[in-house]
Image: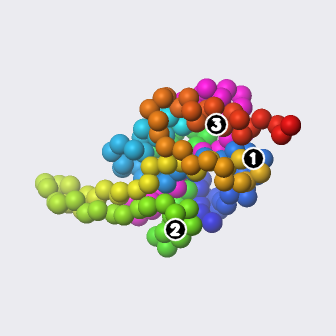
Amino acid sequence: MLTDHMGVVRGLADFKGKAVVLFFGYTQCPDVCPTTMAELASAMKKLGKAAEDVQVLFVTLDPEHDSPSALKQYLSGFNSQFLGLRGDDEAVRELVSEFKAFSQKRAEAPSGDQRGQHTIEHSSGVYIFDPRGQLRLYAKSSGDGGDAIARDLGELLKPAA
């Protein structure tokens, strides 16, 4: 269980009935995270009203620096409905391990006033759960502006025949 950027303790079960897109990243990520979040925001727009049945969860890999307010500010630049989740280092490590994701902090050489800066190498895919809470897909940013993720989510949201 992690806490969202509004202070609510959350688990995947809280979103039953919705498709859930889970992504591990951090707000200072220079490339993968903003690209992926932009594609997810685009996918939500393409889904139209069906986007109400999707919850995007951004799990920070840098809880030391990604405060609730930093997560809220970062995610609101993509979609105000996206939720940022954070926990202590151990809780985040356990979740990363549970999903067999990858995360490794790399210290950068200090230069000027950027002392202590770092990057985090991490998995770049998103985990997509169906509305019953079953993990169904692992997708990577495809550079198609969110079309593939929107199609996949649209299929997962269709009523079972």
Disc ID at residue 131: 1
Disc ID at residue 97: 2
Instruction: Write down the residue under mark 3.
Output: 152
Within 10 Å of disc 1 (Cα), the crowding (few <14, some 14-19, many 20+) is some
Who's the residue at 64% across and 36% down the image? 152
Who's the residue at 63% across and 66% down the image? 1
Q: Is residue 30 above or below residue 6?
A: above
Q: Which residues are magenta?
A: 42-65
Disc ID at residue 66: none
Residue that lies at the very extreme toward the left in this rendered image: 112
Disc 1 marks a residue whose amino acid type is Pro
Q: Secondary structure at mark 1?
A: loop
Residue 149 lies in quadrant: top right
Q: In the rendered structure, which disc, 2 or 3, sits on the residue that comes first in sequence?
A: 2
Within 10 Å of disc 3 (Cα), the crowding (few <14, some 14-19, many 20+) is some
Residue 8 part of the magenta segment: no
Q: In the rendered structure, which disc, 2 or 1, sits on the residue that comes first in sequence?
A: 2
